[in-house]
Image (spheres, rainbow, N blue to C red):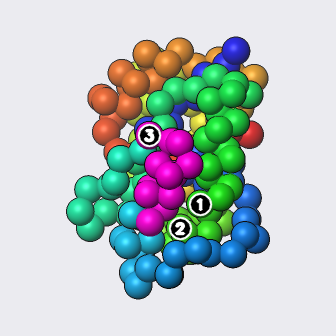
């Protein structure tokens, strides 16, 4: 089975879709509070997810999972339930600034230079990196390259 590594950010957004379920919690007042509400919701739905650092909007990552596995399906279900809690600009369709796009491109280049020649460039509209499920990535190599390159990318499974 193929594995996907999710550093910090957006795999859950790509998996989630738009939930039409009514909100049971009051709407948080700012984006950081929304991210905290999202991570709490994920935990309440069985996903071990830490809160982001204070003041950060980075959604903590999920460990490497086999695509289509029961664990991945559990993540997908939780992400769908919690999707409405995310700030609008963290969702899959957000626009990325030119500066952030260049940072994301540099990070993708660095990943390729550090043992992942098939690591894709980010989408120019959202900045998300779309991982092709037909390309096998060695989890250890991804983790090692990620440590060398630093930073985070929105990652989506295609």
Front residue (pair 73, 112): 73
Q: Is 42 a magenta residue?
A: yes
Task: Provide residue 72's location: percent of width, then percent of height.
Answer: 65, 33
Q: Is residue 65 above or below residue 131?
A: above
Front residue (pair 61, 126): 61
**Boundaries of the magenta span:** 37-48
**C-alpha gap between disc 3 and disc 2:** 17 Å
Which image quarter: residue 150? top left
Dot 2: what SS? loop
Q: Residue at x 53, y 42 (%)?
A: 46
Badges 1 and 2: C-beta atoms under 8 Å apart? yes
N-terminal of the pair, mark 3 or mark 2, is 3
Dot 1: what SS? helix
Q: Residue at x 62, y 62 (%)?
A: 83
Which image quarter: residue 113? top left
Front residue (pair 149, 93): 93
Q: Residue at x 26, y 56 (%)?
A: 53
Residue behind mark 1: 82
Residue behind mark 3: 48
Q: Is 30 a magenta residue?
A: no
Task: Provide residue 62's location: percent of width, then percent of height.
Answer: 48, 37
Residue behind mark 2: 86
Q: Nearer the viewer, mark 1 or mark 2?
A: 1
> From where the camera sits, is residue 118 visible?
no
Front residue (pair 29, 99): 29
Q: Is residue 132 left or right of residue 9?
A: right
Dot 3 crowding, Cα within 10 Å, few <14, some 14–19, many 20+: some
N-terminal of the pair, mark 3 or mark 1, is 3
């Amino acid at each position: 089975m193929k594995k996907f590594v999710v550093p910090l950010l957006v795999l859950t957004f790509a998996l989630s879709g738009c939930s039409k379920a009514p909100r049971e919690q009051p709407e948080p007042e700012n984006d950081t509070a929304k991210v905290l509400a999202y991570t709490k919701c994920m935990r309440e739905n069985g996903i071990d997810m830490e809160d982001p650092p204070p003041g950060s909007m980075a959604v903590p990552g999920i460990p490497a999972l086999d695509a289509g596995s029961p664990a991945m399906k559990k993540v997908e279900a939780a992400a769908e339930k919690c999707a409405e809690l995310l700030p609008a600009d963290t969702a899959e369709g957000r626009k990325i600034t030119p500066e952030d796009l260049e940072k994301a491109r540099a990070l993708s280049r660095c990943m390729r230079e550090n043992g992942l020649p098939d690591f894709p460039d980010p989408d120019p509209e959202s900045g998300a990196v779309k991982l092709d499920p037909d390309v096998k990535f060695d989890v250890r190599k991804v983790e090692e390259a990620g440590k060398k390159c630093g930073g985070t990318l929105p990652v989506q499974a295609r």
